[in-house]
Image: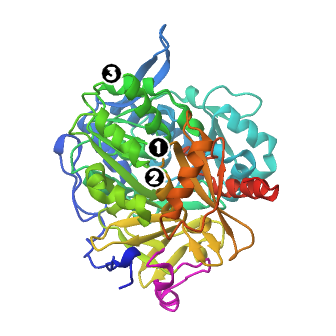
Amino acid sequence: MSAAPHGRPVAAPHGRPVAAPHGRPVAAPHGRPVAAGYWRPVDRFRDIARAEPDREAVIHPVGADSDGMPEYHHVTYRELDAWSDTVAERLAAAGVGAGTRTIVLVLPSPELYAILFGLVKIGAVPVVIDPGMGVRKMLRCLRAVRAEAFIGIPQAHALRVLWRRGFDGVRVRVTVGRRWFWGGDRLVDWGRTPSAPPPDRAPGSDADTLVIGFTTGSTGPAKAVALTHGNLAAMVEQVDAARGHVPPDTSLITLPLVGILDLLLGSRCVLPPLIPSKVGSTDPAHVIDAVNRFGVRTMFASPALLIPLLRRLERRPDELKTLRSIYSGGAPVPDWCVAGLREQLADDVEIFAGYGATEALPVSTIESRELFAGLAERAHHGEGTCIGRTADRVRARLVPITDDPLPTWDSVRARGDLESTRGIGELVVSGPNVSTHYFWPAGADAAGKIVDGTVVWHRTGDLAWIDERERIWFCGRKSQRVRTAAGPMFTVQVEQIFNPVPGVARTALVGVGPRDAQRPVLCVELDPDADAHATLPRLRTRGAQYPLTSGITDFLVHPGFPVDIRHNAKIGREQLARWAERRLGGGAR
C-alpha cells in the first residue's frame, strides 16, 4: 500500500471480485428482464419495438410557436425500427455490409438514430466525430479511417467534395437534407417503410466492432476508439445498474451516445433544441419546458448546461415535479452548482457526478448527498475531487506517472511505487465496457493500453488517488501537470483550494517555462460582478495557507477560459499556458 495525501493509506483498488461479463439481467421497460449472457444491442432494440410499438422513442423539436417556445414531433419505437430497417435495406443494396466503415455527420435527430441503428443492423461500422474540433483536425481524422460510405448533412458533404482527395474510397453517398452539387441519394427519398421483412442475420460476436468514435483531442491528438457490441451491451447494463434497475421512463438527451443507451433501455428520449458544439448556449427555459411538458424523469448534462439551468431556477423557481435524477459528465461539476441544484429541486431528486471517457464509459459516479457529507470540504483543502466508486464490473488501479509506454504489467512493476507523488498516480481501468484498442493512429495502443495476461487496461491519462473506501479522487490531467523544480503540481488538486474564494468563478493552474523548472501560474476567471483588486489579495492569502499552493505567486485574471467543444466544460489549459507566458513575458503580474 502507498501513502495517500495527508498520510491516509491507499486501498488496493483491485481487491473486489469482478462478475463475469454481461452476467446479470437488465430490466427492460416496465420491469421485464433481459436474459443473462451476451446480447446484441440490435436484438434488444427490436424486442422493445415489438413489446411497445406505439411508445414514443424520440421526441424532437421542429420549430417554434408564436412565443418562441419549441414545438415537438415524435417517432415511435415501431416507426424507428421500420425506418432503420429501410436504411439498412437501401444501404445493403448499395453494397454497404459487414465491416463497412461509414462516416456519419448528422445532427442529433430521429434521422441520426435511424441511420445508426440501420448501419448496425447490417453489421456496418458507423464512424462518428465532433465537427466542432475544427475542420482541419476533423478532416485528418476522417481521412484516417478510410471510409467507403458517407452519410451527412449538406455542409459535411461540401467539405468532403472540397477535400475530395481525402475521401477517394467513398463510393456510397447519402445526404440528410438538401443535396447540392454532388451525387448520391437523399435520405428523405428512401421513405420510412422497408419493401420486405429484414433477413435473419448471423448473431456475430461481442468482439465485433460496433462503432468508431473519436476522442475530442482537447488535451492531445484525437484518437479513433473502436467500441464493440460487447462494450455497448455492458454500458447499457451498467447504466441500468447505476439507476437501481429503475426504468428511465422519459429522458432528456444532450449527448447522442446517451440517447442510444436510453433507447436500449426503452426510454422516451426528448431532444431539446441545442447546438452540439455550443451546448453552453442552450436556453435553460427550453430545458425546463421539456422537463415539464413531457414528464422527464432523468437527464444527462455537462456543467455548461447545468450552471445556466441553476441560474434560471434561482431567478424563476420552477417545481420540475417529474424530475428524479440528473447525471453530469464531461468535466467536474462545481460543488456550488450541485449544492444550488439541491436547494432548487425536490428533496428526492438524485444528482450524480459521473466520470468516464470515450474509451471507458461509465467509470465511476458519486451522488450529491455523499459528496456533501464532508467530501467537498476535503476537496477544498487540496485532496482533489472525489468522483466516487467504480461502475459495475469496472476495476481501477494506479500506475506511476510517466509519459512512456507501459506495454505490460511487468513494465508497471518496474517503475516502482507512488511514494514520490504522495500516492497519486495515473488511473487505469478495465472492464467489459472498456475499449481494448484504437483503430487509429498506429502507436495509440502502445501509449494508451497495458496488457495484463488476458486483461487489457486503459490508461485514462488522468491523475488520481484511491481512498480506503475505494473512492477515486481526481487530481487533474497527466498532460497538464505543472513540472516545477520542487516536483509536480496537479491542476484540479490545486484549483479546488482556490475555487471557493469569493469573487472567483473558476481557476486554472498552468506552468510557464522549461520542463521540470516550470513556474506555477494561477489563471483566474472572475464572477461577473467581482472586483479583481479585491479578489486577488484573497487568492494570495488563501494560497499561503496550504503547502501545496504556498509557492504560487503569479495570479492572472483572464476574461473567459477556452473550453472543449463536446461539453463546453473542460478548460483549455494548454491555451491558457501560452497566454500566461505572453503576459508574464511582458512583465505583467
How far from the left and from the top, in percent, is residue 430?
40, 71
Residue sitting at x 51%, y 35% = 108
Magenta segment, prevailing SS (helix, strand or loop): loop
Please name the residue that numbered disc 2 is placed on. 332
Colouring mode (rainbow / by chain / secondary structure / one colour): rainbow
| Magenta extent | 401-425
- Whether label 1 touches label 2, CB < 8 Å: yes
Q: Is residue 300 visible?
A: yes
**Mark 1 to mark 3 CA distance (whole Å):** 23 Å
Badge 3 amino acid: Arg
**Quadrant location of residue 8?**
bottom left
In the displayed structure image, the side of residue 290 where residue 211 appears, left or right = right
At which x and y percent is residue 397? Answer: 40, 76
In the rendered view, would you say 145 is above or below 81? below
Instruction: Residue 362: tell me if it is visible.
Output: no
The disc label shown at residue 486, or none: none
Say which amino acid is labelled 2.
Answer: Pro
Q: Is 537 in the magenta?
A: no
Which residue lies at the image location 33% right of the left edge and 53% below the top edge? 236
Callout 3: few (<14), some (14-19), or many (20+) C-alpha neighbours within 10 Å? Answer: few
C-alpha separation, residue under disc 1 versus residue under disc 2: 7 Å
The disc, 1 or 3, on the residue closer to the chain's N-terminal end is 3
Q: Residue furthest top?
A: 66
Distance from Cα at disc 2 to Cα at disc 3: 29 Å
The percent coordinates of residue 76 (x first, y second) are: 35, 29
Q: Which mark is residue 303?
A: 1
Residue 470 pos. (x, y %): 30, 70
What residue type is disc 1 on? Answer: Pro
Q: Name the residue under label 3.
A: 293
- Label 2 or label 3, whichever comes before in sequence order: 3
Is 198 situated above or below 425?
above
Q: Residue at x 47, y 11 (%)?
A: 65
